């Protein structure tokens, strides 16, 4: 019996090495304008 | 750091520092809650007692599940230690480039919405329009200060930017002439109340604007209560047909129907569903930002209502998706596999460093919400950032800057929150706007629950 189902996610620890290119959008640029969240920002690094 | 919650029939476990998401059954949920405090034998004994009426929960099953938890811990997908704080301290010395500007092309507006954070577009100052020369210099400033960044973002913002439309068109044309020379790609966004939308604007916006943000608060009676012209007349009937025309001819490009909810409609999902029923499918709805004394301000009593509304919204979105009439909601858009790296998650929105607002006369501020706060003026587009103390304050304002965030499971989703919200709530950009935090945490819980449900259905 499987008790735990793990969803596929980006490994944040690995992104210490591959991340930081800075090509992503600034966070509240496009829609909200009045609060900050980075979770909904897509990564734009083709080599991630 | 681990966060566990139950929502819509799902038991969800988030491992903050790896970004892992686990959907678990009741026994595993309890095991994970006890794992760090009890021995294996104690956990087994306690849970056998708790689940004594469940024949499926045997000692063998429980020990197998504990082994799975141990395996996830070893694989750094559960109970992952926080090793990111030193990265945040390094941020003080990092060199940053400017990659986005919010151009305040019009500090004036043709609507007179009492809840406007920009005080009817004037930002507590005089009415003004940005000249082409100032706008062009702002674009040159952006190109010069963007280093090797290719993607540059420019928002045409106000007030109401369509009140200075010819300048917007000329600035877009100028930017396009600079792209090849400097190896840049401009992405423009237009935020408008829709009053001046016509065929010319729609054609141009759908060709040139990467994103269009269309302000609509939802139901006619809600929208028209606050979004009125200077004669006091509501704007709903005048803008909705124009928004439909723009979206219908947008050819699949991005847009948001973006609303604000206030104390008048904490039951804001009715407004979101109204937007969806009008045929729009890319939606955003934000809690009002205003002084606590403003009658529109959300109250302590509104909080439980609003939190429940976010759950209602998530469940309804799943239902409508199944029925083939789904829509997206900005704060529930979360990309678990292709989302932001740890640097982005620590550093946050980029205000004051990567992102700045430009006033009609060329002054630079950390973001649109600081325009008019003289102490936060960074410099201007001719001399660049001269107030380096403020810039450095923003540079180090990140997910690890606030003691209140130390034990918060959501800090790598919000990066410590909005500096402007913190400033307005506490007087410091390193403060915390706890009301906003509560809403934010609920939104992330809902967004991830939607992912869990979609994974189950796949």
Image (cartoon, rainbow, N blue to C red):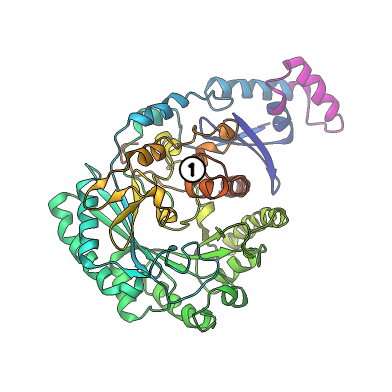
Q: Residues within 10 Å of mark 1 (few under 14, many from 20)?
A: many
Depicted B205 relative to depicted B93: above or below: below
Q: Is residue B340 above or below residue B186?
A: above
Q: Nearer the viewer, residue B48 or B448?
A: B448
- In the rendered structure, the answer to whether residue B396 lies left or right of residue B443 reads left
Percent of width and height locating residue B159 = 41, 68
Instruction: Find out whether residue B37 is within the magenta segment.
Output: yes
Residue picked out by circle 1: B429
Q: Is residue B191 left or right of residue B62?
A: left
Counting from the top left corner in percent of width and height, residue B251 is at: 36, 69
Element assignment for label 1: loop
Which region is colored magenta? Answer: B33-61
Residue in the picture at 44% in, 41% down: B348
- Give B271 or B166, whichever is nearer the viewer: B166
Residue B298 image-quadrant placement: bottom right
Quarter of the rendering occupied by the N terminus of chain B: top right
Displayed quadrant of residue B29: top right
Numbered disc 1: what chain? Answer: B
Residue B324 visible to an observer of this rendering: no
**Residue B144 vertical placement versus B93 (above, below):** below
Query: In terms of image quadrants, where is residue B223?
Result: bottom right
């Amino acid at each position: 019996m499987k008790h735990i189902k793990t969803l596929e996610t980006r490994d944040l620890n690995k992104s210490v090495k591959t991340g930081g290119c800075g090509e992503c959008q600034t966070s509240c640029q496009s829609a909200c304008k009045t609060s900050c969240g980075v979770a909904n920002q897509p990564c734009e690094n083709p080599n991630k | 750091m681990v966060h566990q919650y139950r929502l819509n029939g799902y038991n969800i476990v988030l491992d903050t520092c790896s970004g892992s998401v686990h959907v678990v059954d009741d026994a595993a949920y309890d095991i994970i809650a006890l794992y760090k405090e009890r021995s294996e034998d104690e956990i087994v004994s306690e849970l056998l007692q708790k689940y004594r009426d469940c024949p499926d929960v045997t000692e063998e099953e429980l020990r197998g599940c504990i082994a799975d938890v141990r395996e996830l811990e070893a694989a750094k997908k559960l109970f992952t230690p926080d090793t990111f704080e030193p990265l945040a301290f390094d941020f003080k010395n990092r060199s940053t480039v400017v990659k986005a500007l919010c151009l305040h092309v019009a500090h004036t507006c043709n609507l007179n919405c009492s809840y406007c954070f920009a005080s009817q577009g004037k930002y507590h100052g005089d009415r003004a329009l940005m000249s082409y020369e100032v706008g062009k210099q702002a674009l040159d400033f952006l190109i010069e200060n963007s280093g090797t960044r290719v993607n540059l973002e420019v928002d045409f913002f106000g007030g109401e930017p369509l009140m200075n439309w010819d300048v917007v068109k000329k600035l877009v044309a100028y930017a396009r002439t600079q792209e090849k020379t400097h190896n840049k790609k401009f992405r423009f966004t237009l935020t408008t109340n829709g009053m001046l939308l016509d065929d010319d604007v729609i054609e141009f916006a759908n060709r040139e604007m990467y994103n269009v943000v269309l302000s609509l608060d939802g139901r006619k009676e809600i929208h028209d209560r606050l979004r009125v012209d200077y004669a006091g007349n509501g704007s709903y009937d005048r803008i909705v047909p124009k928004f439909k025309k723009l979206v219908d001819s947008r050819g699949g490009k991005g847009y948001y129907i973006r609303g604000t909810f206030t104390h008048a409609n904490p039951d804001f999902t009715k407004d979101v569903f109204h937007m969806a029923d009008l045929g729009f499918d890319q939606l955003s709805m934000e809690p009002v930002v205003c002084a606590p004394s403003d009658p529109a301000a959300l109250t302590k009593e509104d909080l439980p209502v609003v939190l429940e509304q976010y759950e209602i919204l998530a469940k309804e979105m799943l239902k409508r998706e199944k029925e083939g009439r789904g829509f997206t909601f900005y704060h529930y858009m979360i990309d678990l596999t292709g989302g932001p790296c740890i640097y982005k998650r620590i550093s946050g929105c980029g205000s004051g460093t990567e992102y700045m607002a430009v006033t009609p006369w060329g002054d630079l501020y950390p973001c649109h919400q600081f325009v008019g706060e003289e102490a936060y003026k960074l410099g201007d587009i001719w001399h660049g950032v001269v107030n380096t103390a403020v810039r450095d304050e923003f540079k180090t304002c990140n997910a690890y800057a606030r003691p209140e965030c130390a034990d918060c499971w959501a800090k790598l989703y919000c990066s410590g929150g909005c500096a402007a919200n913190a400033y307005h709530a506490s007087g410091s950009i390193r403060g915390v706007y706890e009301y906003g935090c509560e809403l934010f945490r609920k939104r992330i819980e809902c967004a991830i629950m939607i992912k869990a449900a979609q994974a189950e259905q796949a």
